[in-house]
């Protein structure tokens, strides 16, 4: 009976529970989509500065090589 609870009921219960858990929306900083400043602040201490609001354009044009 214990094995059924551990290997069947508990995993299924956690999977069902995971559909109802949502992350909190507090302390969302713009310009930091992965939360890197929060992780670094937790490890090394926060510097209190906001991230730069710069948009870096990606190079999407194909590179042309001259193979003469």
Image (cartoon, rainbow, N blue to C red):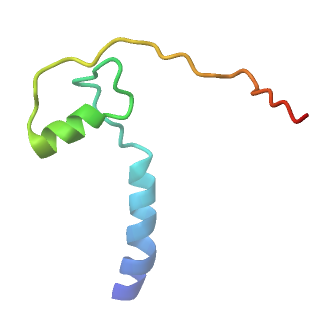
- Based on the displayed image, in which of its 4 quarters is residue 15 positioned? bottom left
- Write the residue at 68% across / 22% down: 60
Left or right, 29 with respect to 14, comes to: left
- Based on the displayed image, in which of its 4 quarters is residue 20 positioned? top left
Q: Residue 65 at x, y = what percent?
A: 81, 31
- Locate the N terminus and report the quarter of the image it occupies: bottom left
- Based on the displayed image, in which of its 4 quarters is residue 42 positioned? top left
Rendered view: 36 above or below 56? below
Rendered view: 26 above or below 43? above
Can residue 2 be seen here? The reply is: yes
Left or right, 68 with respect to 18, comes to: right
Q: Find the residue positioned furthest to the front.
A: 68
Q: Residue 25 at x, y = what percent?
A: 29, 26
- Write the residue at 15% across / 36% down: 41
Nearer to the camera, 66 or 47: 66
Q: How many marks?
A: 0
Nearer to the camera, 44 or 12: 44
Left or right, 40 with respect to 11, comes to: left
Q: Find the residue positioned furthest to the right.
A: 68
Nearer to the camera, 28 or 9: 28
- Write the residue at 28% across / 22% down: 28
Rendered view: 21 above or below 16? above
Rendered view: 6 above or below 64? below
Nearer to the camera, 4 or 26: 26
Left or right, 37 with respect to 34, comes to: left
Can residue 1 be seen here? The reply is: no
- Locate the C terminus and report the quarter of the image it occupies: top right
Q: Residue 6 at x, y = what percent?
A: 36, 79
- Write the residue at 38% across / 70% down: 10
Q: Residue 5 at x, y = what percent?
A: 37, 78
């Amino acid at each position: 009976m214990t094995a059924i609870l551990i290997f069947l009921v508990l995993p299924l219960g956690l999977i069902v529970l995971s559909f109802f858990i949502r992350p909190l929306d507090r302390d969302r900083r713009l310009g930091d989509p992965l939360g890197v400043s929060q992780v670094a602040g937790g490890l090394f201490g926060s510097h209190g500065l906001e991230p730069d609001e710069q948009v870096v354009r990606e190079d999407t044009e194909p590179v042309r090589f001259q193979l003469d």
